[in-house]
Image (tube, coloured by chain):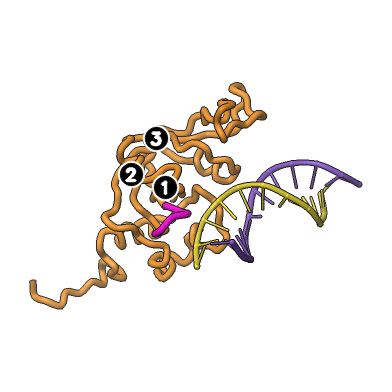
Chain colours: A orange, B yellow, C purple
Amino acid sequence: MARWLVKTEPNSYSIEDLRRDGTTLWDGVRNYQARNFLTSMKVSDLALVYHSGTDPIGVVGVARVVEAARPDPTQFDQESRYFDPAATVAQPRWFCPLVGFVEQFGTVVERHQLQREPLLAKMEILRKGSRLSVTPLTDEEFDTVLRIAHGGSAPKPSNVRRTSGK
DNA sequence: GCCAACGTTGGC
DNA sequence: GCCAACGTTGGC
């Protein structure tokens, strides 16, 4: 099962919106590399949800792929800012999976926290100038962020030492 | 097929 | 608001 990170500006669609909606089409992505990742997503894959262009910037929760990608309806909608005159129903150009809400973290795992975690050194989203809105994650990257989110800043579960006898 | 110009993204 | 990074466009 693959792991992903999806980026969104909370002004346009936030984790709160996803929690409210339950599921949503991850539409409006207009970048070929990101599209290829979207169409690679399988049902039950998990994705970190990342808020950009806001304060604080960072990972805010988890989503799950509910249905594999279908043609993105906004490419056919002349009223949409994502309308693509070159796309046809017979030959769609853009695709979007249906994603579902899994959880919203109690506190945002902020970008600067991610940046100082050695295990995340290769995470695509942290690369300067990275603009890809959908990126694959290693299991280790995904697990590391979840561990931080759930209160462990501990280096590794196996290395955790209790200092009290409790 | 190259590449300069341009528009957009997004962290700071 | 600035600006670096990036993708796209279009002239040649």
Image spot of residue A137 (x, y percent): 44, 54
Q: Which image quadrant for residue A88? A: top right
Label 2, on which residue? A16
Q: Is residue B6 left or right of residue A132?
A: right
Tell me the chain of label 3: A
Mark nearest the camera among 1 and 3 is 1
Label 1, on which residue? A10
Label 3, on which residue? A24
- Residue at x 59%, y 43% (from the top left corner): A31
Residue A123 part of the magenta segment = no
Q: What residue span does the magenta drawing correspond to?
A: A51-56
**Marked residue nearer the N-terminal end (1 or 3):** 1
Q: Is residue A94 above or below residue A123?
A: above
Q: Residues within 10 Å of mark 1 (few under 14, many from 20)?
A: some
Q: Residue furthest left?
A: A166
Give the Cα distance between marks 2 and 1.
9 Å
**Marked residue nearer the N-terminal end (2 or 1):** 1
